[in-house]
Amino acid sequence: MSISVHAATAGTWAAVTVAGLGAVACGAPQTIEIDGSSTVYPITEAVAEEFRNEQPETLVTVGISGTGGGFQRFCRGETDISDASRPIRQPEIDACASRQIEFIELPVAYDGLTVVVNPKNTWATSMTVAELKMLWEPEAEGKVTRWSQIREGWPDREVHLFGAGVDSGTFDYFTEAVVGTEDASRGDFTSSEDDNVLVQGVGGDELALGFFGYAYYAENKTRLKAVAIAEGADTSAAVLPSPETVRDGTYTPLSRPVFIYVRQASLERPEVAQFVEFYLEQGPKLIPEVGYVPLNDTLQALVGRRLEARTTGSAFAAHGGSSRVSLEEIYADQ
Amino acid sequence: MEMLRTTTRARRLSDALLAGCGLVVLGLALLALASLLVDVVLDGAGRVSWQFLTSMPSRRAATAGLLPALVGSVYLILLTVLIALPIGVGAAIYLEEYATQGPVARFIELNISNLAAVPSIIYGLLGLGLFVRVFAMGQSLLAGACTLSLLLLPIVILSTREALRAVPGSLREGSYALGATRWQTIWHQVLPVATPGILTGVILAISRAIGETAPLITMGALTYVPFVPNSIWSPFTVLPIQIFNWVSRPQAEFLTNAAGGILVLLVLLLSLNAAAIVLRDRYRNQRT
């Protein structure tokens, strides 16, 4: 009896010791560490998967700490590349600067935020940004609760709102584009970090209205109806989201760019440089596969040049930090 | 006499009623579990195949697999138990057999009970600050195992103490009477008798640890890891993270993958627990 206990205990400690020694002996092979936004994750995963066929000896790992969490790690020098569904913010730029971490900002794709309603909803085929603002601004809470309040002639029935989780980049961007201030929104809506939950919600509720990334609409077109969005007051100029309208910039203001931020020091390692070049080169082919929209050709060329010239810093910060600016414009004068 | 009969009848009735209620409640709980299981099996059973178990993650749902997550989960749980078990059992032995009852011991006990109720994401933050950064372990298997160990320590300590308390005092006294020291008594008499109870605690701990996602994502466990961890310093991912990622993808095929992943996770959990149960029964049989 006592012998077996001895043996078991000795075995435990031997295992711990062996595990410890084994670890010391192993060195790290070439690795590229990526972390950040879960929105950008499918794109980076696709690129990493293809890159593995090209360069099997380089190990690429991708995490999903979120855009903010990713930048925190990136600015501590823990990762080589950070996925981001919004441009880097000033406090994050400062954090990077305080540790002498220089980065290159590369937009890689567009995501078209899609406003959706239930297919049984026959009235809301298009909406203006002003109407969306009236519905989503903080002052609307508890007051704008019926479709008839949004536009005259719409039914006098309740409106049920579904939106992205308040910590997500999707929510940040939607509120900035629609309400005008980031994160300013009414609070009385069903929110979920999981967009599939929102798809279910809107798909099962005739009076629902929600918003999420285009990929989730594209996969559920039979269960959802997209609302065309007009930037001005003229609803006849409203545009439906599609890969084409997002790409050519007519679907505004709800199409947003997503980014990768590359640490400049890491780019001096050949495998990282190859990976980033591969990303920009193969991106246009892989991005539609995972439900996002590739940049247009002009922009692709501009971004390629930015990488080649190793232009550091954020072009957005230089333009006041708003994420609602034309990408061509701000990257053209770099 | 008549009154006595009525009260007896009333008591019998309430007794039967309570038993009936208990049965209904148990049935409801089992029904919920069974419907969940049936749902997952219907969704995912067709997806689980050798290819699914041995492939790397992929953007294509049909070719994606969960090998790194499966191996990562197994390594992580084993490593976690190796860390949490000696520390937890040691702490419990100290508290139960050596510590004198006083304000300090009570304070420690109170804290252990409180720790068991701390949300797991807090442990993730602690793991990120302490193991990943201060101890510079990085986002490694070891850092993950240390983080989960913290999470499991209260469970292991509490169940070990219960097991130690269940050892009859006569056994200790008999040992002392034969001239054994305190440590000899604990090592040769008390611990062997308490081992089945301790292993029950380990089973509970494994069940808790294997499903944890939040603390691991917080401490920086990855999602896309196209290789099997080869040392305790290796980056890693685990099944719950892989399942979480698949569930949140827009394509419906990934939801099938997630159901398959849940099945694999269930089987892994059951087999780890079965191993612990077999070990426990072996100890029990040796004693008799």
Image: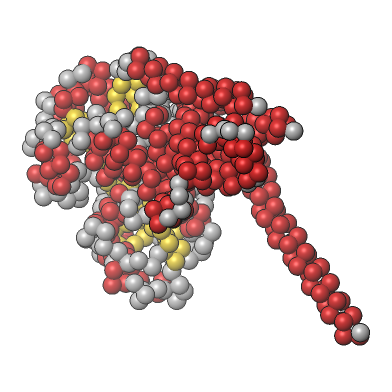
Q: In the picture, residue B188 is in which quadrant?
A: top right
Measured as percent of width and height from the top left, residue A146 is found at 41, 74
Which of the colour schemes (rainbow, by chain, secondary structure, one colour) is used?
secondary structure
Check the picture and name the quadrant holding the C terminus of chain A. Answer: top left
Identify the residue shown where x is 40% and y is 64%. Answer: A189
Check the picture and name the quadrant holding the N terminus of chain A. Answer: top right
Identify the residue shown where x is 48% and y is 58%. Answer: A202
Measured as percent of width and height from the top left, residue A46 is found at 38, 29
- Comparing B171 with B192, the one in front is B171
Q: Is residue A104 left or right of residue B278?
A: left
Visible in this render: residue B240? Answer: no
Identify the residue shown where x is 49% and y is 58%. Answer: A201
Q: Is residue A54 left or right of residue A271?
A: right
Indicate whether A236 appears above or below A107: below
Indicate whether A19 appears above or below A331: above
Measured as percent of width and height from the top left, residue B153 is found at 46, 42
Identify the residue shown where x is 26% and y is 18%. Answer: A271
